[in-house]
Image (cartoon, grey):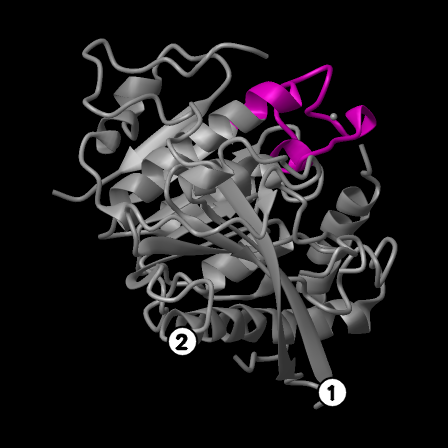
């Protein structure tokens, strides 16, 4: 495994309006480089499943695998040094955890419970694969494998604050295929007896997730031709602002914050209101901001110390994300009881809407 953590399909033309939205999002995200209590209020009748915000039964392993594909726009190599969090064997329980990643490096993959659902996570503009380790580590502890590739040309190491329009457009045209390539590469390793992930991944249970620019990619990959079965988008910019038509075709949970100055909550509400005929959920933090979904936040940008603390925001994200993926990806019973408007009633930290067809 490479120890240098910090070093480490083809789309239609994006409009200038999309570029403007992503510019603002990237400017806010790139300004960050550093930061409640209690649990969500369940229904009066306790759900059958355990509190999804609590750590799961597995120790967590983390590794890095490199995949290389050809750019859609330039033909040059795109080196995708992908971080992967996964349920680890019990032998990792007492091993030292890499503090910046929340997992034991290169631990053995758990055999108990395999094959596991696989979730791909796409970082924000100017972000890094490990931008939301509180989330990727939490899902892994609950039996999900989470793969987070970089998007070359649009990472913290490539640009600051990623305002160049041509670069944003290039990333827009490459990001969905970055995700697909990493997904296909991991599924190939699932069939490779020499791989640490041999027979550890369930190709029938694939989830997509992402933040900001990565949230937009998530919405793009939630359409009818998607290889994924469930999608969770954090603060995605609205499709209408980018002249994009996004017809969501798989169960989707959309998250946002009222204090978000990059991709305002109205944009997430627009997505939710457009979804018909499939399970759709909307989680809004009244006092949360654009970076409530990342490991760190800058209070001056809103939604941190004077609003919703990072600790509380992360607890709520993990609560609903785990309940959602357990229900619509892992197929576990009981977690759907948490995903109701009634269950969230009276919790001042959230606005929650659910639309589940009969």
Q: Say what secondary structure mark 1 lies in.
A: loop
Local packing at callout 2 (Cα closer than 10 Å; few below 14, some 14-19, many 20+) is: few
- Residue at point 36% right, 63% down? 228
Residue 287 in magenta stretch:
yes
Answer whether residue 164 is magenta in the image: no
- Residue 53 as seen in the image, left or right of residue 149: left
Write the residue at 69% across / 35% down: 99
Which residue is depicted at the point 31% across and 58% down?
229
For residue 333, above or below residue 131:
above
The reply to whether dot 2 and dot 1 touch (C-beta < 8 Å) is no
Q: How many residues crowd around disc 1 within 10 Å: few (fewer than 14), some, or many (20 or more)?
A: few
Q: Is residue 280 left or right of residue 209?
A: left
Q: What residue did someone put label 1 on? A: 76
Q: Nearer the viewer, residue 200 or 356?
A: 200
Q: Could you tell me which quadrant the C terminus lies in?
A: top left
Q: Position of residue 237 (x, y in %)?
A: 59, 51
Relative depth, front residue between 58 and 342: 58
Residue receiving disc 2:
192
Q: Is residue 89 visible?
A: yes
The segment highlighted magenta reads: 285-313
State the image coordinates of residue 134 (x, y, percent, origin top left).
58, 34
Per the model, the C-alpha gap separating discs 2 and 1 is 27 Å
- The relative height of residue 335 versus residue 98 in the rendered view (above or below) is above
Residue 255 visible within the image: no
Q: How many marks?
A: 2
Residue 202 position within the rendered picture, expressed as x and y whole percent measured from the top left:
30, 61
Query: Judging from the image, what secondary structure is the residue with disc 2 in?
Result: loop
- In this view, the residue farthest toward the left is 358
């Amino acid at each position: 495994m490479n120890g240098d953590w910090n070093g480490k399909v083809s789309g239609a033309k994006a409009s200038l309006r999309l570029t403007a939205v992503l510019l603002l999002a990237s400017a806010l995200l790139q300004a960050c480089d550093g930061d409640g209590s209690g649990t969500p209020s369940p229904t009066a009748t306790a759900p059958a499943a355990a509190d999804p915000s609590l750590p799961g039964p597995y120790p967590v392993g983390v590794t890095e695998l490199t995949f290389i594909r050809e750019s859609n726009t330039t033909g040059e190599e795109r080196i995708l040094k992908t971080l992967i969090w996964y349920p680890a064997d019990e032998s990792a329980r007492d091993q030292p955890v890499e503090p910046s990643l929340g997992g034991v490096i290169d631990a053995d993959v758990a055999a108990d419970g395999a094959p596991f659902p696989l979730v791909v996570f796409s970082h924000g503009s100017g972000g890094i694969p490990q931008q939301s380790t509180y989330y990727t580590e939490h899902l892994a502890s609950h039996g999900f494998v989470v793969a987070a590739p970089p998007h070359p040309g649009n990472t913290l190491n490539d640009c600051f604050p990623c305002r160049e329009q041509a670069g944003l457009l290039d990333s827009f045209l490459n990001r969905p295929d970055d995700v697909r390539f990493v997904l296909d590469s991991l599924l190939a390793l699932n069939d490779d007896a020499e791989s640490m992930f041999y027979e550890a991944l369930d190709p029938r249970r694939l989830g997509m997730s992402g933040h900001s620019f990565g949230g937009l990619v998530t919405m793009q990959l939630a359409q009818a031709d998607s290889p994924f079965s469930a999608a969770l988008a954090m603060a995605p910019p609205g499709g209408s602002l980018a002249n994009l038509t996004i017809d969501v075709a798989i169960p989707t949970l959309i998250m946002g914050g009222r204090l978000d100055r990059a991709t305002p909550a109205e944009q997430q509400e627009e997505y939710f209101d457009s979804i018909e005929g499939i399970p759709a959920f909307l989680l809004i933090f009244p006092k949360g901001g654009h970076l409530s979904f990342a490991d760190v936040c800058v209070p001056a940008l809103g939604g941190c110390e004077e609003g919703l603390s990072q600790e509380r925001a992360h607890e709520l994200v993990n609560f609903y994300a785990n309940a959602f993926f357990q229900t619509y990806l892992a197929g576990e019973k009981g977690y759907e009881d948490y995903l109701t408007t009634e269950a969230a009633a009276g919790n001042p930290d959230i606005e929650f809407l659910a639309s589940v067809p009969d």
